Image (cartoon, helix red, strand yellow):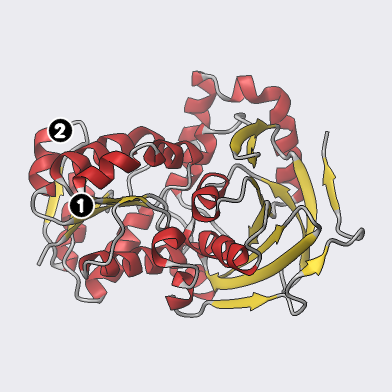
Amino acid sequence: MNNFLIYGANGYTGELIAREAARRGLKPILAGRSQNKIEPLAKELNLTCRTFSLEDKKSLEYTLKEVDFVIHCAGPFSLTAQKMVEACLRLGKHYTDITGEIAVFEAMAKLDESAKKAGIMIMPGIGFDVVPSDCLALHLKNLLPTATSLTLAFHGLGGISHGTRATMTMNIGAGGAIRQDGEITRVPAAYRTREINFGDATKTAVTIPWGDVSTAFYSTGIPNIEVYTVVPEANLKMLKLSRYLGWLLQTKPVQSYLQNQIPEGGPNEKARKNGKTYLWGEASEEKGNKVEARLICPEGYTTTVLTALKIAEKISAGNFCAGFQTPAKCYGADLILEIENTERQEDSRNVRTVSDNDRLKRDE
């Protein structure tokens, strides 16, 4: 039975999801704009396919009528998500995607009431961003219910796909973002750096405008949120430089040049198989107590495939929450532990008092 649609199956991540779905005996409809990519893939996997753009409302709605939900994989999602989710609302079909863009999460959150009226679930971010970190955030909130600040960090992503690079390039020069007193606040790029013990090693990490700045608030209610990642020193310098050249980097000629330099594809099979991703999180409260926890997950794209299909299986079984949802809000903090080769580690001291030795600095 073709009970779900993978739109953007011709893209790097969409194809990975499609291949694993077929390996499991699932029968999604594969769709996208590129006929010369979609049709050969569908033929190889013995799956049904459709080729159309999201501007083709008639074809989009015709295809959605055949399924119960969609896994939207065609980014940049800030340009594509609205058309797909609006069609899902019109036809009463569940919407999921693999975005990591703050603006998309915030736009989807505004559709909560509309989704409830339609009896559907809108759940953006069912991949690496944000399932592991979202589950880690809620786990920390459960350990310290009075938490008012949340810090998340990750490293070990390895290579990134063409689509992810395209989105990052589109947003280069836009600066960073944190959540402060419940509101998303723009800050300079590389706003803060921090030494973080990921378990495998202690590394210098820098703030980035990651999706959890949006989603963790809806999952936990914690009003102050920062997200960090580890980048090479040269990249950190470039981030700081973008504070002053952001206006130039966002001009049409420069964007066109940068987008054209992005290579196709993403990490190869060996890199995906051997890679690991390390996550760390800390929740703290005004009295000075805090809790820490860590996650070790498969490589980022492998995690995306596994979490996307885990959630797809739940929706197929009728297990969903109407309205706008985050993965942890609907399925709980232990959702990520259902993914193979994932381990969660808690700080042995559980709740502890903030130490003066905690290293945190703001880069002016």
Q: Amino acid at mark 1?
A: Ile
Q: Position of residue 301 (x, y in %)?
A: 45, 62
User: Which of the two residues, 312 or 80, is positioned nearer the viewer here?
Assistant: 312
**Image quadrant where residue 59 sits:** top left
Between discs 1 and 2, the one toward the N terminus? 1
Q: Residue at x 52, y 68 (%)?
A: 299
For label 2, the SS is: loop
For label 1, the SS is: helix
10 shown above or below 355: above
Q: Amino acid at mark 2?
A: Asp
| Mark number, residue 38 | 1
What crowding class fits label 2: few (fewer than 14 Cα within 10 Å), some (14-19), or many (20 or more)? few
- Quadrant of the image for the N terminus? bottom left
Q: Would you say 163 lies left or right of 34 here?
A: right
Q: Would you say 139 lies left or right of 314 here?
A: right
- Quadrant of the image for the C terminus? top right
- Front label number (1 vs 2): 2
340 shown above or below 33: below
